Image (cartoon, helix red, strand yellow):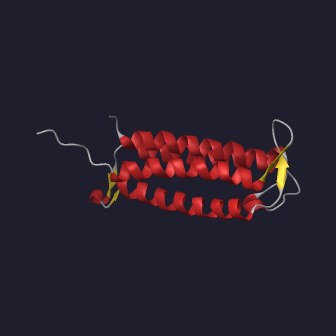
Amino acid sequence: MGDPYRAAARAYFFYGLVYLVGGLYLISQGVGVMGARTADASARTMLFWALLGLIPLVVIPWLLSRPWSWLGGVVSRTLFAWIVIALLAYRAFKVGQVARRGGGSVAAPWGGEISFQAGALAFLAVTLIALGFVLRAVTHRPRLIP
């Protein structure tokens, strides 16, 4: 079996990509941060959020995918992964609240509408999958062959 941290990095990249594309789509539909309405989804706003979203999309998988440590091992890939787990768990909690509460809807890219509740459930699934991969990487202990 391969390095579980590399699998976690790939899962986080997929998670980040889904959130980046989904977030940009919501902004284009007039839904901003935390579900608030936005008056102007200009090209400048979309570019700003796209560039900002690329940072965690690239940096977090890169830091998860290779072994590293600073300060004599005090700060390491493992500690970083635990921080990512905490952030993903918080995100799952907040998205779960939206899924429970429901609310409005937005036009679906394929036509029709998609409710905030259905969208939140899809985002929740992606978040929990990424959380599971990162948690598995941190708790994985390689088998020692005698």
Q: Residue at 86%, 41% (x, y): give it.
A: 112
Q: Position of residue 128 (x, y in %)?
A: 54, 52
Q: Position of residue 35 (x, y in %)?
A: 77, 60
92 or 22: which is nearer to us?
92
- Outermost residue on the right side: it is 39
Q: Is residue 60 left or right of residue 112?
A: left
Q: Quadrant of the C terminus?
A: top left
94 or 28: which is nearer to us?
94
Q: Residue at 53%, 57% (x, y): give it.
A: 88
Q: Position of residue 123 (x, y in %)?
A: 64, 50
Q: Is residue 66 left or right of residue 58?
A: left
16 or 109: which is nearer to us?
109
Q: Residue at 73%, 65% (x, y): give it.
A: 101
Q: Can residue 106 be spotted in the picture?
A: yes
Q: Can residue 45 be spotted in the picture?
A: no
Report the number of discs.
Answer: 0
Q: Position of residue 91 (x, y in %)?
A: 59, 60
> On the image, which quarter does residue 15 sit in?
top right
134 or 105: which is nearer to us?
105
- Outermost residue on the left side: it is 146
> On the image, which quarter does residue 93 sit in?
bottom right
**For residue 59, above or below residue 116:** above
Q: Quadrant of the N terminus?
A: top left
Q: Residue at 81%, 55% (x, y): give it.
A: 31
